[in-house]
Image (spheres, grey):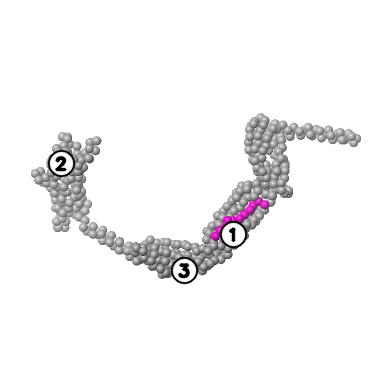
Amino acid sequence: MLNFAMKKGVLILTFIILGILPLVSAINLEINPLTNDVAVIKGTTMPAIFDLNITNKDSGSNFMFYNFFGSDIFPKGTVYIGGRESKTVKVGIYPRSDLNQMGRIIFDLYIQDDDGEEMKYPLMLNVVKLEQAFQVGAEDFEPDSNNVTVFIKNLINFNFEDITMQFKSPFFNFEEKATIPAYGKESFEITINKEDFRELMAGYYTLNVMVDVQGTKETFQGKMKFIEENIVASSQDDYGIIVNTKKILKVNEGNVLSDASVVIKKNIISRLFTSFSPEPDLIDRQGFAVYYTWNKELKPGEEMAISVTTNWTLPLLAILLIIAIVIIAKQTTKKALSLKKSVQFVNAKGGEFALKVSVIISARKYVDKVRIIERLPPLVKLHERFGGEMPKKVDERTGRLEWNFDRLEAGESRIISYIIYSKVGVLGKFALPTTAAVYEKEGEVHEAESNHAFFVADQIRRVED
């Protein structure tokens, strides 16, 4: 009976082995891990990620990945790898909640193809506690620093995503979220307030960093070096335009007696309107510049405050008054009637040189008995055609033309124009006499004169071109 039972057990074991053998053979894959010493954090559910370079030495197929070590795995579904193709596959293993082992653990990764054939590949996982994962510290900083740089370094091959960190020291307290890749280092520049540590001595201080990874918390400690230095900090506030005030503050932020000095430069004009508080210790004149100097020996924590005020109110009022006087003077002396004269080239049928002369008469105020007197230049003749108002008198012998207007209302304008021509060509600049006007305003006789109008012979060529 015993021999029969043994034979029956061997037969059953043989069937089991024959049933298993097809499952663990026939896949021809070459696997090369691209990452070493992959870690997982005990007490968290974040996956350990393996980068595997897989070469299919057989025909193409879809491959499924699974294991019996972790609680879950990715990629989900299958990954296609063609024949003779190499592909990098990221395989993530999620740790079980009852994982108690620590240190390096070897387990099998199973890979199955479309035909149900499979192979296994051993992977090594480093199970660590959170307290083994990070190193923290800070760069040295000085008493006059406005910022300090702290860092946290990932010591293991594990990608931390969206972890919370709280940095605490006698100099600051702040919280930050970050993703830190495997063996990565993240630095943070923190703004510090000098008033918070004015009384702190130089030396080493403790930096505490509390890290929260999915509810698992651990505090890491590092060192900060506060460098001793003999310094005087300086700040300046400058505001105001018409009444300009400049405030200068010197503060001894070191731990020894320090000399502080302030020099202000003013010119010979601005110094007349400048006041100081306190009065300067030294005044030095150099040409058009005046230098004011303050000197003081400051104890630790002591400050020197200087206020310099330049008041431009009086000179500005004087300038504005002068401008107002000039404007009023111009308005009172401005003529009630203005004349604007212009000249324009005209194409004549006979090929003669011809110009059209126009004069715009504008009344700024009410005027009456207006007489416009125009004189023709020599060597030109007057064309019988006129534009705008017709002249009252035309004396071709003397070349004198006159227009008369009974009155012009304020803002009213009149235009007179005429054409002159000459059979003699013109070279260079052709100037016309000014137009004169005689008029009455409030019973008094006044005169006005137009601008000088001229014509350059080059303009003819440009028109013909």
Q: Is 412 left, or right, of 139 in this rendering?
A: left
* Label 1: element kind: strand
Which residue type carries mark 3?
Answer: Lys
Q: Nearer the viewer, residue 268 or 135?
A: 268
Asked if one can make out residue 406 in the rendered structure from this viewpoint, the answer is no
Q: Is residue 231 above or below residue 366?
A: below
Instruction: Find residue 208 and report its image quarter.
Output: bottom right
Where does the image place residue 169, in percent across and percent down from the top left? 60, 60
Q: Residues within 10 Å of mark 1 (few under 14, many from 20)?
A: some
Q: Mark 3 or 1 closer to N-term? A: 1
Where does the image place residue 399, in percent across and percent down from the top left? 11, 45
Disc on res. 296: 3
Q: Mark 2 or 3 closer to N-term? A: 3
Where does the image place residue 364, in percent across and percent down from the top left? 21, 53
- The residue depicted at 14 percent of the width and 57 percent of the height is 444
Q: Which residues are magenta?
A: 132-142
Q: Residues within 10 Å of mark 3 (few under 14, many from 20)?
A: some
* Label 3: element kind: strand
Question: What whole-number distance in Å separates the C-alpha atoms at marks 3 and 1?
Answer: 31 Å
- The residue depicted at 45 percent of the width and 62 percent of the height is 236
Disc on res. 420: 2
Query: Mark 1 = which residue?
Result: 225
Q: Nearer the viewer, mark 2 or mark 3?
A: 3
Queried whether the magenta region covers residue 201, the answer comes back as no
Disc on res. 169: none
- The residue depicted at 57 percent of the width and 64 percent of the height is 200
Where does the image place residue 312, in percent across and percent down from the top left? 35, 63
Which residue type carries mark 2?
Answer: Ile
Q: Mark 2 or 1 closer to N-term? A: 1
Quadrant including the C terminus: top left
